[in-house]
Amino acid sequence: MSVHIVIDGYNLIRQSPTLSIIEHRSLAEGREALLQRLVSYKKVKRYPMTVVFDGAGAGSLMEARTRWKGIHVVFSRPGELADSVIKRIITRERERVVVVTSDKEIAHFAAKHGSATIDSIEFENKMTMAIYGEFIPPADFSEEEDISWIPTTKKKGPSRRPSKRERRSHAKIKKL
């Protein structure tokens, strides 16, 4: 099953230390900077992405949808919050969706419908690692020997296995 990443646009911009500085100069510049980063991320990971923004300033009475270099961009209708658009997407696609937001209400709604969620800052870190990770050459550990490991039969780890839903959610987020 393919993963569809749905991003709460302004939430991610305002949580990010670098994007929030750009957004203070101009809202449009903040959106464009976010979209540029997502395009770079999409080149590496190739997941379908939808970014949802509040469309309070939009002149149209309808929800505005567009594509920007392979990324779906959605502006909510005037008077409607981006949260309700994201909730509609979650309701329609359920387990296929990974929601990027720091909003607790949306995260709870997504978990209730079987969708995985990831915090905005954590996603930005994963995005940065994916974008710049392709330029860092892998380390060569073939000649080193690990003498610190001592074989043992003593079990370590959690005493309880996470639920199936939690394991699936963790697996989706791990793919990012």
Image: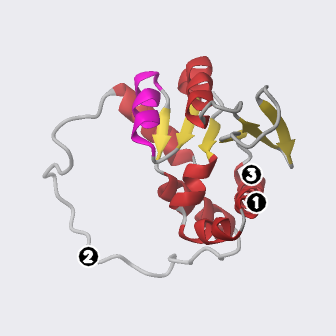
State the residue at coordinates (59%, 34%): 81
Which amino acid does the dot numbered 3 rest on? Lys
Residue at 72 percent across and 61 percent down: it is 37
> Which residue position holds label 3?
42
Q: Residue 12 sits in which quadrant?
A: bottom right
Closer to the N terminus: mark 2 or mark 3?
A: 3
Res 126 seen here = no
Find residue 94 and report its horizontal and vertical position in percent. Answer: 55, 22
Instruction: Name the residue carrying label 2.
Output: 148
Looking at the rendered structure, the secondary structure element under dot 1 is helix
Q: State yes or no: residue 110 in magenta.
A: yes
- Return the x and y of residue 73 as percentages of the image width and height: 76, 41
Q: Nearer the viewer, residue 72 or 3?
A: 72
Q: Nearer the viewer, mark 2 or mark 3?
A: 3
The earlier-in-sequence mark between 2 and 1 is 1
> Is 33 displayed left or right of 5 in the figure?
right
Closest to the observer: 96 or 28?
28
Calculate the distance from the C-alpha at mark 3 to the C-alpha at mark 1. Answer: 5 Å
* Residue 93 or residue 9, whichever sits in front: 9
Q: Quadrant of the N terminus?
A: top right
The answer to if 140 sits in the magenta stretch is: no
In this view, the residue farthest toward the top is 92
User: Residue 117: x percent and y percent?
Assistant: 47, 39
Q: Is residue 130 left or right of residue 72?
A: left
- Packing grade of label 1 (10 A; few <14, some 14-19, many >=20) is some
- Marks 2/3: CA distance? 39 Å
10 Å neighbourhood of mark 3: few (<14), some, or many (≥20)? some
Task: Name the residue rendered at 52%, 76% in the picture.
Answer: 142
The disc labelled 2 sits on which kind of residue? Ser
Q: Amino acid at mark 1?
A: Ser
What range is drawn magenta here?
103-114
Identify the disc placed on residue 40.
Answer: 1
